[in-house]
Image: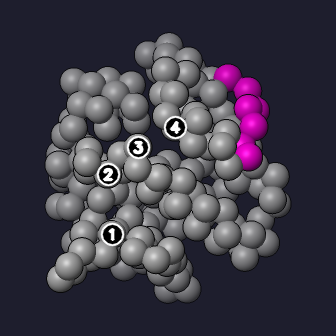
């Protein structure tokens, strides 16, 4: 499955969001979803890991909800994949999977690109499904770009999360 036919590649200088190419991009994500930090902040369990089969199912699900992108940085000779993100009406999961690129402003640049894309699509709002209360970096990222709290939710394990909304 390739990306949505009219789903564009989004650019911000040396950073781009390109439509995911499935199943080819699944192997890129295996190291990300084996990283304890990624799993703690995305799934609430640092001991969890996703194998290629789980990532494939997750990517198929996310691509069905909206626009699934691979986050890439321009390297000396090629684009380097560092994470993934989905733009969907009720969720905006964003993962910087490569540790050396976390907390360096890439998430903010990615989210700005998605906000611009949502506006171009004519959306009135963007939402998150829930960000764990202990995930302070993600909460600051979304709040810093104007998202406001829109309620609390608990996952199946009872971990508290905050839903966010941005009026466009």
Q: Which residue is mark 2?
A: 101
Q: Which residue is mark 1?
A: 73
Q: Nearer the viewer, residue 30 or 145?
A: 145
Check if mark 4's residue and mark 2's residue have beta carbons within 8 Å.
no
The quarter of the picture where the C terminus appears is bottom right
The span from disc 4 to disc 2 (Cα, nearest Å) is 14 Å
As drawn, the label of residue 103 is 3
**Foreground tag (4 vs 2):** 2
The span from disc 1 to disc 4 (Cα, nearest Å) is 20 Å
Q: Is residue 138 above or below residue 115?
A: above
Secondary structure found at label 4: helix
Q: Earlier in the sequence, mark 4 or mark 2?
A: 2
Q: Earlier in the sequence, mark 1 or mark 4?
A: 1
Q: Which residues are magenta?
A: 146-152
Q: How would you rate the neighbour count of disc 4 (Cα within 10 Å): few for under 14, some for 14-19, many for 20 or more?
A: some
The span from disc 4 to disc 3 (Cα, nearest Å) is 10 Å
Q: Earlier in the sequence, mark 2 or mark 1?
A: 1
Check if mark 1's residue and mark 3's residue have beta carbons within 8 Å.
no
Q: How would you rate the neighbour count of disc 3 (Cα within 10 Å): few for under 14, some for 14-19, many for 20 or more?
A: few
The span from disc 2 to disc 1 (Cα, nearest Å) is 10 Å
* Residue for point 66% across, 43% down: 144
Farthest-out residue, top: 158
The span from disc 1 to disc 3 (Cα, nearest Å) is 15 Å
Q: Nearer the viewer, residue 162 or 65?
A: 162
Residue 28: where, in percent of width, then height?
Answer: 20, 61
* Residue for point 77% across, 65% down: 123
Check if mark 3's residue and mark 2's residue have beta carbons within 8 Å.
no
Check if mark 2's residue and mark 1's residue have beta carbons within 8 Å.
yes
* Residue for point 31% across, 75% down: 74
Q: Earlier in the sequence, mark 1 or mark 3?
A: 1
As drawn, the label of residue 138 is 4
Residue 8: where, in percent of width, then height?
Answer: 52, 82
């Amino acid at each position: 499955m390739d990306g949505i036919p009219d789903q564009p590649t989004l650019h911000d200088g040396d950073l781009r969001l390109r439509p995911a190419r499935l199943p080819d991009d699944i192997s890129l994500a295996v190291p990300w979803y084996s990283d304890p930090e990624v799993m703690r902040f995305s799934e609430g369990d640092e001991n969890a890991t996703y194998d290629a089969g789980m990532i494939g199912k997750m990517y198929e699900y996310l691509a069905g909800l909206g626009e699934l992108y691979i986050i890439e940085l321009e390297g000396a000779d090629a684009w380097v994949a560092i994470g993934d993100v989905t733009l969907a009406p009720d969720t905006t999961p964003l993962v910087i999977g490569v540790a050396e690129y976390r907390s360096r402003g890439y998430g903010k640049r990615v989210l700005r690109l998605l906000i611009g894309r949502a506006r171009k699509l004519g959306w009135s709002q963007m939402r998150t499904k829930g960000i764990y209360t202990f995930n302070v970096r993600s909460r600051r990222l979304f709040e810093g770009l104007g998202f406001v709290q829109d309620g609390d939710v608990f996952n199946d394990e009872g971990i508290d999360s905050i839903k966010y909304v941005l009026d466009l």
